[in-house]
Amino acid sequence: MRGARNMEDYGLFLALLGSALLVGFVSVVFSLVWVFSYREGLGWDGGSAEFNWHPVLIVTGFVFIQGIAIIVYRLPWTWKCSKLLMKLIHAGLNTIAMILAIVSMVAVFDYHNARRIPNMYSLHSWIGLTAVIFYSLQLFLGFAIFLLPFAPVPLRAALMPIHVYSGLLIFVTVIASALMGITEKLLFALNSTVYSTSPPEGIFVNCLGLLIVIFGALILWMASRPHWKRPPEENAKVQQPIGGAPEGVEAESTMTDCSNADKSDVGFNSEAARKRNFKLDEAGQRSTM
């Protein structure tokens, strides 16, 4: 039944995924066109060109790449890959997004300091910095708890719902901050009188904002559909730490080759152990940073 439902919705998933990738890519292109056609391009000299790295890197990393990291577990052709491999891809994408976000913040502070503009006075800056801080914390805890093999499985299962919720919340917060930021930039660059006349730059950047909203909506829809969730691994490979492990404790598979992922591993000896493993694996399937 589950397989038939997945097959029935596979075309819809591909349509949404393709739409999200297209809209996200076009958003990045729009941000580049904006800074090169209407602003002063890109540079690193303390001037406006340095500030322009901020919107470009936020849209590219904090919006587009973070959105892809959220749904990477949902890609059905990766379901036969090991959980460890998908965790590494998920963490890697989020790390790239974090690095780009930090560089974008440095560009803003450098520009403000060079122009002697006050820092951290607007609501956009408050929410944006809050998102960066919580995203850093989310990334750190994700590495420490879900990627490294030290946290006990019951702790992972207990924290997974919080990890998922906070990841989606941060993503929505980033989109809200981006929308406030591009509006704030237009008001400063064009002033409210010119902006109210709907100049070409204003219309173009408003379209960029709409693309960001559409991309976010597509990502959140795909991430919230339970029938597109990565199915539990029925055959979990038990990893024994040095000195052995208590019976029934789930451990992560060390397999990183997708071609070998569908081979049977060590089974559980009792019905209770199988049920306990299924519950823990079901609780720990979806990870969004």
Image (cartoon, rainbow, N blue to C red):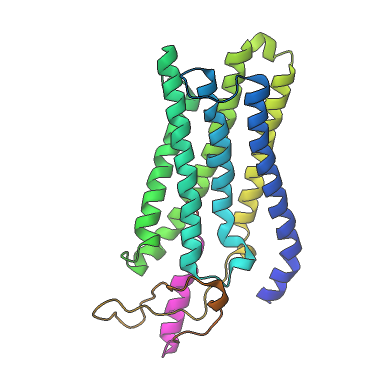
Please count the marks in the image: 0
Please determine whether, in this image, residue 184 is positioned above or below residue 256. Answer: above
Residue 100, position as x, y percentages in the image:
48, 39
Q: What range is drawn magenta here?
A: 268-286
Residue 132, position as x, y percentages in the image:
43, 38
The quarter of the picture where the N terminus appears is: bottom right
Q: Residue at x 62, y 49 (%)?
A: 219
Q: Residue at x 55, y 53 (%)?
A: 70
Q: Residue at x 48, y 76 (%)?
A: 278
Dominant SS of magenta comes to: helix
Q: Is residue 106 left or right of residue 233?
A: left
**Can you see residue 221?**
yes
Residue 98, position as x, y percentages in the image:
45, 42
Residue 179, position as x, y percentages in the image:
59, 30
**Can you see residue 287?**
no
Residue extending farthest to the bottom is 269
Residue extending farthest to the top is 193
Q: Nearer the viewer, residue 125 or 66?
A: 66
Q: Residue at x 41, y 20 (%)?
A: 119
Q: Is residue 146 left or right of residue 286?
A: left
Q: Is residue 106 left or right of residue 181?
A: left
Please determine whether, in this image, residue 192 is positioned above or below residue 265. Answer: above
197 in the magenta segment:
no
277 in the magenta segment:
yes
Q: Nearer the viewer, residue 46 or 73?
A: 46
